[in-house]
C-alpha cells in the first residue's frame, strides 16, 4: 500500500512539473515589447554651474558646503524600507534637494546605523521652481 501511494505521488509530481514547464521556444505569436515610459531628456550640466562641482557619492554636508543650502528639501521612503531582512538599511529613504533655477540633487541614506547621506542623482534643470510641484 505504501509503495502504491509513493508511485502515485511521484507520477502526480512528474505530470505537474512537465505541465508547468512551458518552453519559450519559437512560437508563432511573439510578445510585443512593453513601451518605455517617456522620460525627460537629461540636460548636460554647464561648467559654470554650481552643480558642476558635485559628483555622485559625495556626502550631503560636503555638497551643502560647496554650493550652499537648497531652496527646499523633500524626503520620501523607498521600497527597500519594507524588506523584512534588509539589515544594512542603505537606500531606505531619499532626500531631494531642490535648487531654484538649477535643478535637483537626490541623496540616499548610507546605512540604517548612521545619519550619512550620499548623492545618487544630479539633475540639472534651469526651469526648476525650487519646490515640489503639486499635481
Image (cartoon, helix red, strand yellow):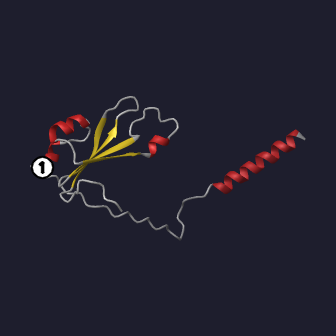
Left or right, residue 98 beside residue 115: left
Q: Label 1 belongs to which residue?
A: 49
**Place of residue 39 in the rendered image (x, y in percent of width and height, measured from the top left):** 31, 61
Residue at 76%, 45% (x, y): give it.
10
Q: Nearer the viewer, residue 16 or 39?
A: 39
Left or right, residue 42 beside residue 8: left
Name the image quarter holding residue 5.
Answer: top right
Residue at 77%, 49% (x, y): give it.
11
Q: Tell me: residue 133, above or below residue 111.
A: below
Most distant residue in the right direction: 1
**Place of residue 17 in the rendered image (x, y in percent of width and height, measured from the top left):** 68, 51
**Place of residue 56 in the rendered image (x, y in percent of width and height, measured from the top left):** 25, 41
Name the image quarter holding residue 112.
Answer: top left
Q: How many marks?
A: 1
Q: How crowded is mark 1: few (under 14 residues within 10 Å), some or many (20 or more)?
A: few
Task: Give the quarter of the figure containing the N terminus.
Answer: top right
Secondary structure under tag 1 reads loop
Q: Tell me: residue 91, above or below residue 20.
A: above
Residue at 36%, 29% (x, y): give it.
114
Amino acid at each position: 500500500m505504501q509503495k502504491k501511494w509513493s508511485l502515485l505521488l511521484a507520477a502526480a509530481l512528474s505530470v505537474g512539473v512537465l505541465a508547468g514547464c512551458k518552453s519559450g521556444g519559437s512560437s508563432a505569436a511573439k510578445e510585443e515589447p512593453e513601451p518605455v515610459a517617456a522620460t525627460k531628456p537629461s540636460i548636460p550640466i554647464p561648467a559654470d554651474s554650481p552643480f558642476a562641482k558635485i559628483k555622485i557619492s559625495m556626502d550631503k554636508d560636503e555638497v551643502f558646503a560647496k554650493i550652499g543650502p537648497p531652496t527646499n528639501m523633500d524626503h520620501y521612503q523607498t521600497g527597500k524600507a519594507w524588506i523584512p531582512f534588509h539589515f544594512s538599511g542603505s537606500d531606505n529613504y531619499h532626500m531631494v534637494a531642490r535648487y531654484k533655477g538649477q535643478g535637483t540633487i537626490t541623496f540616499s541614506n548610507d546605512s540604517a546605523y548612521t545619519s550619512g547621506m550620499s548623492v545618487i542623482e544630479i539633475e540639472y534643470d534651469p526651469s526648476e521652481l525650487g519646490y515640489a510641484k503639486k499635481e
